Image: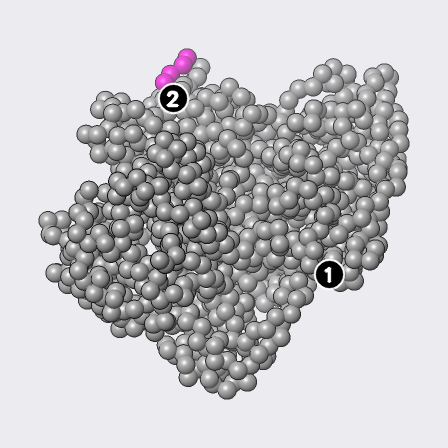
Amino acid sequence: MSEFEPKIVGFFCNWCTSSAADLAGTSRIHYPPNIRPIRVMCSGSVDTSYIIRALLEGADGVMIGGCHPGDCHYVSGNYKARRRVAIVKSILKTLGLNDKRVRLEWISASEGKRFADVVTEYTEELKELGPSEIKKLGTI
Amino acid sequence: MSNMDTVVVYGTNVAAQRAAANLGKSGYHVLIINKGKYLGEVSSQLGLQHPRAICNTCLRFVINKIPHVEVINQAEVVSVSGEAGDFKVKIKRTEQSVEPNLCIGCNKCIDVCPVSVKDHDIRGREFERKAMVAVLRPVTPIDYYVDFDNCTECGECTKVCPTNAINLEPKEVEETIEAAAIVLGPEFTESDAILSEFLYGLHPNVIKSSELELWYMGTGPQLESLARPSDGKIPKSISLISTVGFSDYEFASYSSDMLVLEEAMQIKKLNKDIDVYVFVKDLRIYGKGHVAYYQKVLDNGIKVIETSNLKLANENDDISIEYTIRGKSEKVISNLVVLSPGQKPDPNWKELAKRFNIELTEAGFCKVRPLSSGATTREGIYAIGEFVLPMGDSESIYDGTAVIPHVISHLSSKYVKPKPQPRFRNVQYEEPSTAVLFCKCGGQFDAAIDYDKVKSELSSVYSVSKVEFVDYLCLKDGIAKIKQTAADPSINRIILAGCGINAKGRKLQQVVAQGGLNPSLSELVQIREFVAWVHDDKDAATEKAIDLTRYAIEKAIHSEAFNIPTEEYDKRVLIIGGGLAGLRSAEILADRGYEVILVESSDKLGGTASEISLKLDDVDISQYVSKLSEKIMSHDRVTVYLNSSVLDVSGWAGRFNSTLLVKTSEGEKRVSIKYGVAIIAIGAKPISSPLFDNKNVISLIEFDKQIMQDSNYPKSLGSVAIINDECLQEPDYVSNARLCSPHMLRSAIRIKESNPQVDVFVIYNKSISYGLYDLYLEKAKSLGVKFIKVDSKQGVSIKHGNKILLELIDHYSGENINLSVDTLLVATSILPDINVSKKLATDFETHLDSQGFFITPDDPYESINIQFRPYDLGTHGVFVAGLSYSSRTVEDTIRLADTAAQNALFIVSKKKIQAPSGRLIAYTIERFCSGCALCVDACPYDARFIDPERKVSVVRETICDGCGACAAACPSGAAKLRLFTEPQMFAAIDTLIWGSSSKNKNPEN
């Protein structure tokens, strides 16, 4: 059996984390292809339902990337994201999911290297965790 | 005069970039003359934006994306002839070695380049590069250039370049540009010469702060970026030194010491176990929010040492720093020393001034006319930013705005013509039919992507009518292809798979619009940056490319065509407060032809500025204010209401309504007014102090009033001590030094000049001077004024008698000093009338700090936006000027008033206001809305409100910035963000997870 390849959905804010991903690209810094980035305008616009949807559909991990605290392009969106992710994490247990399945990261536009590092590290972490518990439940 | 709407901006300092952005956004043509190979050779390399060490990358590099702004690189101005409104600017430029419009960033030229160059990075580490160099920066396309010092001109790169973008024989070209006005914003240069006193260049572990920032570059601040040059170890103890106080050669930039504190915080954030010391002579914290930040720095365990004596010595790989504090000598061993030098006028500016035929000051900065916001000695040429003063970034930002109304006055069209909106085909009732145009980027994707698989997978996706591969989407053929596809009536969705919006994507989307298809029906897929350049595994990369394209297809299918909302604004401007700031903005707006309503609470115009005795060059401020008051009172387009106040405010930017309460001799009356933009300039008043019970204790403002009546007044005072009332405050005081320090220095000079025999003492706490006011400090010292720095309240005690006795503890020596003086002058803090500011803040939905000064709506965790966007309050269309923003000098007030006026002009000069983020805008599905107002709370811009009659949430479209916070907060799915609606997002998530196996899955589920 080939090695388990986790599927990660990334919600990256347009101004910081998406730009960091861009910079990682222009700098040709390699990282695992497991991440599927979705560009959103602000991490504060990531609805809890998006995260839950992704997990229920079978994503092995969801990563939300925003600007560093205090740097939000839209004043305070990243703080909203922080609270929202804390709420989602608190209900993951109820769903029978490990709370590492959701990860919030602050990555600024100049941190291309860090973007690649974080994605690599998260992919490794999820590989160790194994497939999403949702899949084991047999619901999908 | 010809039809001249062109402005030449020379140089690229922060203020110049701001000015160019401002003019470009206003619709005027801007040419930036840049000496460097690409824009922002220096500024773009700094990791974090000061003030407050925030990232800000997203705003910094937007300048080359603003329409009407053109950059001419590798260019220098030779001469300027003609006059204001009709300048002929002769420039000499060298053609670029790599043409940015053609370059696709494939790196083939670098791969074949046979020349290997040994270069040093900023930390002195050797690395190898080629003679072809790529410059990587966030949020901008990659810039390439040929290093001609090492290039052998073998021509290999030109052979492999797929787009013929390389020019190995760039010619020097002379051109003449016609411009109506010129704005000068050259950068200052750091001077290294004096830094050797601090072992710079002599010890490997002594570096400059700009170098530390460069270490962050590319990765952002990381612990590794602190590794010291000598052995690559992470230091356990770091000392930051602001060199400016210890040398006489340079000027302190407005933000120099705050910058050092921010760097110290940055290091502490990376590892709180590192001991961080900050050495300064006089800590220059004088402005809004500075003291609070300083407290935070202390709370984080950073040691800030103010000393007059500092000595650095080699200690193997470390550096020992000896200093004296309160008379005692102490020593610190540091593993790394970071020097923060001040600013110096560039010696080349002398020659520059000759070319532009303008004058410099004795200190070497550009001479500007008093009260002019940057007018040089030659009409039509303006100087801004570091060229005028050693400004910090936040001052530069408003300097770049304040100059605009004056620049515009030389242009032929005072109004901005609206751009015609392209007409789009109506595709509302058509079944989605998608064309995927997949760029190969000149074969760059071959290694990572299996095109056949992409084609076969995508062709079977619902709605996809065609999948085509194009060699270059961004070149002529590709663009023709996009245009043709967009015009094809059988296609109503276009997916452009290639590069991102920061590369060529933005341009490509415009081509879609030109072709007649609404850009909201097209999507970009970043194959290049997100897949091809970062993944090796061809199968996995191909799968990811397919997934990403499919997600874009789903998003496009679920998107709707809509146009950018526009709104017509009321062109009238309400100015609250008839002081210097209010009058100045009223003058600018009224002279440009806009109607102004000026509301003043007292019975005359003039405010605080009319009471101070101050001459700037040969202009007397109180006379200037009284003349300006007369002009405004009799101005055709200004309606002045004296003895009046604003009772209520309704509506929002573009459509405010208010009732004024006007007291006249016949009694009170109410007046209803309508206006589009408001400027708040209610000013502030000096606070009273119990010290004033003694008749020999007077405030500086009172001192000024007396001088205006009797110029011999200073002689009657006898010996004088001037004390800043900060010295008597609790540690959480709000600094008044920005206003008071120059005032204290001027007053001390004046007393000493009129009566050289008497003793004059100046007692201060934190900073007595900043920026160019150092010149006053020098003069005062040379006249024999004595300066005493005290630590805090405990260091000062005042006894009244026949003479006033002061017992002080000197900060540097720790000695007790007893003074006996005839008169004590107190520089009092100023505060706005809290009742008035509170009411206005509530009415206009803006925010106040704890003292009642207006601020931007910052978040509860850290207050960052105060300095970041200085005068742009959260509520669109409401601006603040004058002392009601913070305590500041007359020069600063003028600059601020001009900024407020320009911000108002920016709005009223447009026929229609566009939503700031274009198509990206929030909306409400009213039948789902329960009127709970969660979205109203979530919105950071007050762009949503509950319609009082229908009880549903309504979006103020020209205020919404499109962040989507409301959509995420809405519990009933009524609040939505266009282009990112729930059906779009759910479809996107599903496709990404299910990938190719979800072919038959109904996307609606």
Q: Position of residue B279 (x, y in %)?
A: 75, 44
Question: What is the distance, in whole Å, between disc 2 and disc 1 at their CAs?
Answer: 65 Å
Q: Write down the region rendered in magenta.
A: B666-670
Residue B828, compared with residue B205, is above or below; it is above
Could you say which quadrant of the image residue B926 lies in? top left
Is residue B825 among the parts visible in the rendering?
A: no
Around disc 1, counting alpha carbons within 10 Å, would you say few (fewer than 14), some (14 to 19), or many (20 or more)? some
Judge by depth and name the residue closer to the eye, B92 or B632: B92
Judge by depth and name the residue closer to the eye, B734 or B11: B734
Q: Position of residue B188 (x, y in %)?
A: 63, 58
Amino acid type of disc 2?
A: Asp
Residue B3, compared with residue A16, is above or below; it is below
Could you say which quadrant of the image residue B672 lies in? top left
Local SS, label 2: strand
User: According to the image, label 2 marks what residue?
Assistant: B648
As for residue B111 lying within the magenta part, the answer is: no
Residue at 41% over, 28% down: B844
Q: Label for residue B365?
A: none
User: According to the image, label 1 marks what residue?
Assistant: B230
Q: Earlier in the sequence, mark 2 or mark 1?
A: 1
Amino acid type of disc 1?
A: Ser
The residue most toward the top is B667
Q: Position of residue A80 (x, y in %)?
A: 42, 35
Q: Position of residue B501 (x, y in %)?
A: 36, 58
Q: Chain of mark 2?
A: B
